[in-house]
Amino acid sequence: MQELPSQDARVDLVHFLIPLEDALAFPDGFVQRLEEAAMIDDLIAASASGQDLDIGDTVHWVSLKFWHQETDASIDILRAINDVARRAIPTLAPTNDGSYGERPAVPITVVECVAPLRTDIDDEAAISEAFDECLNSIRLVQRAYRATTGLPAALATRERMPVMLPFAHRSGVTAENPAWPDGLEIFVPHDNIYRLARYPDLSTADLQRFQHVLQAIDSHRVFSRFADLRQQVWQLARRQGEYETAVILAGTATETLLDDLLISLAWEERMPPVDVGTLFDSGLEWRIRSQYHNRLGGVWNLDRPGALATWRRDLAALRHRVVHAAYTVRHEEANAAARAMEDVFSFVSDRLATPQNIRRWPRTAIGLLGTARLEELGLLTRRTRDLLTDPNEPNWAATFLRYQIAVAHARSDAAELFDAPDEARSVVFALIQPDGRVSWWLHDRTARCVRQCLRPELPEEQEASFENWRAGIPLVDLTEPVTMVMMGATSSPVHGSHWHPEYKVLPLEGIMVDRSDLADLDQILAEAT
């Protein structure tokens, strides 16, 4: 065990035995003592309690001793995988345990961490506080170790610890009385009991919901990005102890939620993407102050108590410090940031879940809350149900995703984010309108733009194929243009033509909820000479 610091007075000490994820290359028994000297605040507190303290005196200390141990490398996981393989592939022969070979020895580092216990609070709180001090000290040593050696060292956090850790509590220690205990006690650093057992099987209803969510995430449905990021934040904060990453991702998740919400509201308003794009020329706080209250009501004032004020204090400001000043986040700060994200989600959900707002923004409400939640709230009206089955409605997920992309292309910084249209990578297609008119176009799929072009010279076989296709189109039944791609064909732009967003010409690339995308087609056709 470690030597005690010189102490004339009695002191309570705690010895934690903390395993590290990565073994460190310190010599066995290496000791690192970390001390915190008294500052002005400590002097003020000491004076108030009648204690004698000078600047530079040690007010906090932690002593770390690094022990190395070897353990058998468990091959239980390999055995389990092989057992499953034999369930899945019945032709495989049974496995003999001896075939796994001798278990190799793997080194681990266990840190004996000694810290004084406060006596002015209850034992449980004092032990938990001392444990956090120990982890902070270990992380400091690990960062210095990584910077010195370039070797891996996953930072110690509560969430990376085993579910139970042994510790020794020494009460009333003096230089003459070491007060060693007779046994060890158990400290529980977190509640991640999911590691100890598998959760119960999902019910039939849960599996149906899972399929719905799977489809939503795979199709990039509105708000699915937030739903995914939200779970990642809690995984990082509560399960992995990646506090800085959790804060950054919580900021991203909340901004994604608010941006997707605004774009979805604009989509239901039939607002042109070019107008929506200008809303993103200013920052998020400007949009919060100016774009949501007049649509959804509620308190969107960042200076008044509420979810948005909490977001700015506990999440936005903290994320800024992490990103721009490499601030080291504490356990409780990461959890406060995650809760701030949840508060914004709850606030937004509550604002949408009113009869007035659901009448105005039914697609957005369904996208964020889901039909099951609306039904629980008694807000799934007949009008909303009819909208879900209306054959004249476009595919919401695909149409909104294209609208969202069009908004991104309409932003002032789009030139820095997206490729400019290029004739060289464009394909040629023919467009036939319901009145029989034929026009020819270049389509740059990468830039999502089209431009009128001259009729290409087609090989005889391709020309015949085009004419047969054209002759077979029942114009009398045609309600919107149809297109045919001419693979391998090349052409030049028509004089006076310009590049246009593809949704203004291609009917299958529509973005507007009311299918008004082609309203400018005749005007676009007329621009060329």
Image (tube, helix red, strand yellow):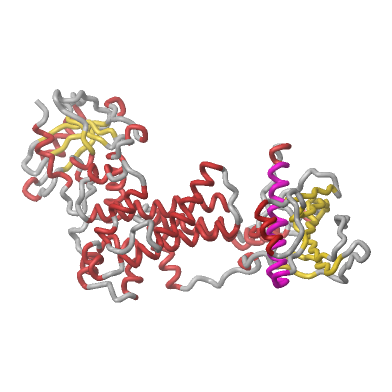
Which residue is nearer to you in this view: 120 or 286?
Answer: 120
Which residue is nearer to you in this view: 172 or 355?
Answer: 172
Q: Is residue 93 visible?
A: no
Residue 239 is one of the magenta-drawn residues: no
At 88% from the left and 68% from the top, the residue drawn is: 179
- Prevailing SS of the magenta stretch: helix
Looking at the image, residue 473 sits to the left or right of residue 238; the answer is left
At 56% from the left and 50% from the top, the residue drawn is: 244
- Which quadrant is home to the C terminus? top left
Q: Is residue 452 above or below residue 308?
A: above
Q: Is residue 49 visible?
A: yes
In which image quadrant can residue 237 be found?
Answer: bottom right
Residue 127 is one of the magenta-drawn residues: yes
Image location (x, y in percent) of residue 41 = 65, 55
Image location (x, y in percent) of residue 291 = 28, 53
Looking at the image, residue 311 sits to the left or right of residue 404; the answer is right
At 32% from the left and 32% from the top, the residue drawn is: 415
Give the residues drawn in magenta, as a range.
120-145
Which residue is nearer to you in this view: 426 or 476?
Answer: 426
Which residue is nearer to you in this view: 225 or 326?
Answer: 326
Q: Is residue 361 above or below residue 105?
A: below
Image location (x, y in percent) of residue 269 = 20, 54
